[in-house]
Each structure stands twice: as C-alpha cells, then as structure tokens.
Image (cartoon, grey):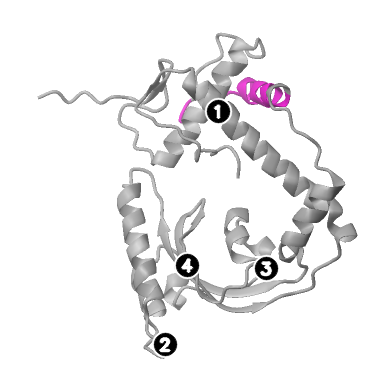
C-alpha cells in the first residue's frame, strides 16, 4: 500500500514537514507568506539563497524584504476627508469611549491536527441549538458552556464578565462592540483562538465622540481597509502565476491581515 504523504508546496517549496498537521487557515497563512517571500526574491529584495521557512517562520531578512515588497507593490490612496466623515457617520458606535458588553461564550478551539471542517459543523450545530432556545426555558447556554467550551470560563457558564474593547482580541472585539444585538449573536465569531458562540447579556453604550476627536483613528481604519483589499488582490495575482500543490487560495484568504 502506498503511504506516501503529499506535502503542500508553493513552486516546489514545502510548506510543512511530512507528518505536520495544519489547519486549513494555518496552511493558507504559510502559502501566502511563501508567495510573498518568493516575490521578494524575484524583485531583488531578498537573496536567492534565503532559507525556506522552518515551521512557518521566515528569516528576519525575508520579513524585512516582504515589508519592502508590499510598500512598493501596493499603491494605497490616502483617505479623503469626505470618505472619513462618511465612514464615521456610518460606524460612530465603533469609536464609542467606555462602551461595555457583558457576554458569555462557548469556545470551539482550533488546535494543530484538528479537523476544522468537523469543528465548524459542531460549532454551527451548537449555535443553532442555542438560538432556538425557548424564552424562559432553563439556562441551556450555561449547560452547553460547562460541558463543551474549551475556555476556562466554561466552569462559570461561559461568563466573560463585563468587557471593554481593549480586553479582547481585535477580531473578537470587532464582532462584539458597536453592534445593537443582545442575546445569542446570529453567526459564529472567529478569532485566533477558534470559533465562538457568543451571547450578549447586556450592553452599556458609552459615549460616542465627535468626528474631530477620532479623525486620526477613522483615517487609520480606512487605510487598513485599503491595505486589506490591495493585499488580497496582490496575493490573487501571485497565486495565479504560481504552482500550488496541496493548498487552495481564494479571495477570502487574507491571513496576513488581522
């Protein structure tokens, strides 16, 4: 019987060790980084004998070369005053000062070697179950958190207490703050720790400062959006010209941007 394991590669460069188990997202992260590392070589920004990444970690020279490559390749417009004001008007709640949310969650942690597709199905089934709970019924959320969650908060019914945006990972905070919902959120929340089913128990809105007070923060948010879009398009071009084995990249894969 043939037991040969196909190692994912980008233009012949291995992305993992033969027996190394990676999640789909981790594999995409390595593929994108390798596409950029090789592009930096072609641009003359990195020596051709730069060593391939070990366990997904590039050399210091490669990291600096990739930064220089992106600065050269991505043409990012400076956000206009009108665009900043329009963004602030539509998302003023994101810039509220002192906003607090009382939340609890069930965490489905992503760990090396885990079947991410199966984990997602479990998390989605849990979300549907908890969203369908009858009003006034016994505390099903707390029970599920105690028996299922991979977070220590599970012992306390998943309760995270009162949170401010700075208390959370940025990708978690983006889903939790500046929103009106109370109750179980309608979709899974993705973070660096895994997949979360989140229930908002209460909100305190805080104070929303005027545009002038948060002008620089608004401009930075728009710059980040432009960078994300430009990087996604650039990676698509690199992937289209590369030979990819054992890894798929698509428009949704922007793993270098968090």
Span highlighted in magenta in the image:
54-71
**Pick the front one: 18 or 252:** 252
Whether the residues at callouts 4 and 2 have beta carbons within 8 Å, the answer is no
Q: Between marks 4 and 2, how big is the CA–CA gap? A: 16 Å
Comparing labels 3 and 1, the label whose residue is closer to the camera: 1
Identify which residue, 75 or 125, lies in the foreground. Answer: 75
Query: In terms of sequence position, does the residue under pointer 1 or pointer 4 come before the other?
Result: 4
- Structural distance between the alpha carbons of marks 3 and 4: 21 Å
Q: Mark 3 points at which residue?
A: 164
Alpha-carbon distance for marks 2 and 3? 28 Å
The vertical placement of 214 against 148, above or below, is above
Q: Main secondary structure of the magenta part?
A: helix
**Badge 1 density bin: few <14, some 14–19, many ≥20, Cα 10 Å:** many
Q: Is residue 146 visible?
A: no
* Sequence-earlier tag: 3 or 4: 3
x and y, in percent, of residue 203 in the image: 64, 77
Kindly state the secondary structure of the residue where label 2 is placed: loop
Q: Residue 128 at x, y = what percent?
A: 36, 69
The residue singled out by tag 2 in the image is 135
Q: Is residue 140 visible?
A: yes
Q: Which numbered disc covers residue 222?
A: none
Horizontally, is 150 left or right of 234 in the view?
A: left
Tell me the residue that label 4 is attached to: 186
Task: Residue 92: give x, y in percent of width and height.
Answer: 75, 63
Sequence-wise first label, 1 or 2: 2
């Amino acid at each position: 019987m043939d037991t040969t394991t196909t190692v994912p590669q980008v233009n012949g460069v291995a992305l993992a060790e033969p027996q190394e188990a990676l999640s789909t997202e981790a594999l995409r992260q390595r593929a994108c980084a390798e596409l950029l590392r090789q592009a930096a070589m072609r641009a003359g920004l990195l020596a051709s004998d730069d060593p391939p990444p070990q366990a997904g970690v590039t050399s210091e020279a490669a990291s600096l070369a990739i930064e220089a490559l992106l600065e050269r390749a991505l043409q990012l417009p400076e956000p206009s005053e009108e665009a900043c004001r329009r963004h602030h008007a539509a998302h003023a709640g994101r810039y509220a000062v002192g906003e607090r949310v009382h939340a609890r969650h069930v965490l489905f942690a992503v760990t090396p070697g885990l079947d991410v597709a199966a984990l997602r199905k479990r998390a989605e089934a849990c979300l549907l179950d908890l969203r369908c709970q009858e009003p006034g019924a016994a505390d099903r959320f707390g029970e599920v958190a105690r028996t299922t969650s991979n977070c220590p908060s599970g012992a306390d019914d998943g309760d995270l207490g009162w949170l401010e945006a700075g208390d959370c990972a940025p990708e978690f905070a983006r889903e939790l703050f500046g929103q009106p919902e109370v109750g179980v959120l309608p979709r899974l929340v993705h973070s660096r720790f895994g997949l979360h089913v989140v229930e908002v128990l209460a909100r305190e809105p805080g104070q929303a400062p005027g545009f002038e007070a948060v002008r620089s923060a608004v401009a930075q948010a728009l710059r980040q959006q432009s960078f994300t879009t430009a990087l996604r398009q650039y990676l698509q071009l690199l992937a289209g010209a590369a030979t990819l084995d054992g890894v798929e990249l698509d428009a949704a894969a922007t793993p270098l941007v968090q």
